[in-house]
Image: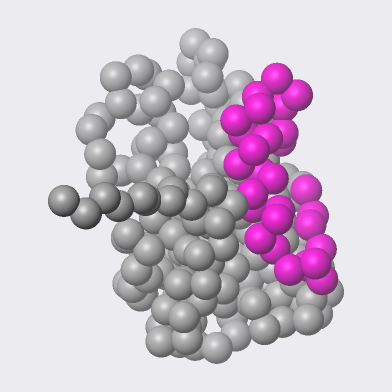
């Protein structure tokens, strides 16, 4: 019997390979309207972020808007963020902010990639006190933030791709906070999709336009 030795690629190599494959895919299925606004949805490891990045690989300058914080006590999350940073072109500018409305209203000429709305929402829910609330007082501030973001997407003159997670296709979360987050993320995605020029969905690394 012939013996085979299988080499498992490192996570960095796997990420680079995925980006190359998705870049080839992007040559076949690019954003069809050219310049404007687009929302890209997908589940975990669906390829949504890599495909969104591939759309801007030919640009000299891009604003990459990172919505997450990097806790000192979470090495796994630090590793994930590091992988994202490593695969971005050196000319891209990273902007760490929650002020997505301000970014979209800016007159800066270069494109914007926002990754991701799911993390932005989690932090907004923190800010409005949704997790530990004993009443519904957090809902109105949240609706105002989501409405302002959707309006900014509709009105921006910048070329923008927004990335978000699709979490409504799995099992119903067993916790109240999990159900709250799933429902509010679904509402946020729907509001932004309605405002964007295009909406795309990634499954197993394959992007498809749904709007």
Residue 104 in the image, given as x and y percentages of width and height: 72, 65
Image point (66%, 60%), residue name: 87
Above-or-below relation of 127 to 162: above
Q: Is residue 52 left or right of residue 158?
A: left
| Residue 93 sits inside the magenta stretch | yes
* Quadrant of the rendered image containing residue 68: top right
Residue 31 in the image, given as x and y percentages of width and height: 48, 82
* Residue 205 seen in render: yes
Above-or-below relation of 84 to 180: below
Image point (65%, 77%), residue name: 57
Image point (42%, 69%), residue name: 199
Nearer to us in this view, 72 or 150: 72
In this figure, which colouring scheme has been used for the structure?
Answer: one colour
* Residue 48 seen in render: no
Image point (38%, 63%), residue name: 205
Q: Is residue 121 left or right of residue 87?
A: left
Q: Is residue 96 left or right of residue 147?
A: right
Above-or-below relation of 116 to 178: below
Please give the range of residues in magenta: 69-96
Residue 188 in the image, given as x and y percentages of width and height: 47, 49
Q: Quadrant of the C terminus?
A: bottom left
Nearer to us in this view, 59 or 83: 83
Nearer to us in this view, 56 or 193: 56
């Amino acid at each position: 019997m012939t013996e085979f030795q299988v080499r498992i690629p490192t996570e960095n190599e796997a990420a680079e390979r995925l980006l190359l494959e998705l870049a080839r895919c992007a040559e076949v299925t690019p954003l069809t309207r050219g310049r404007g606004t687009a929302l890209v949805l997908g589940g975990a490891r669906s390829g949504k972020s890599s495909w969104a990045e591939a759309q801007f690989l030919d640009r000299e300058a891009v604003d990459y808007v990172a919505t997450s914080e990097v806790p000192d006590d979470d090495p796994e999350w630090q590793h994930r963020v590091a992988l994202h940073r490593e695969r971005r072109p050196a000319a891209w500018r990273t902007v760490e902010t929650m002020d997505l409305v301000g970014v979209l209203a800016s007159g800066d000429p270069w494109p914007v990639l926002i990754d991701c709305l799911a993390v932005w929402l989690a932090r907004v829910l923190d800010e409005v006190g949704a997790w530990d609330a004993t009443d519904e007082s957090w809902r109105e501030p949240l609706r105002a933030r989501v409405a302002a973001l959707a309006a900014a997407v509709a009105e921006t003159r910048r070329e923008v791709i927004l990335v978000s997670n699709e979490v409504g296709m799995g099992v119903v979360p067993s916790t109240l906070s999990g159900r709250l987050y799933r429902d509010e993320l679904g509402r946020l995605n729907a509001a932004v999709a309605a405002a964007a020029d295009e909406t795309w969905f990634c499954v197993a690394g394959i992007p498809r336009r749904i709007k």
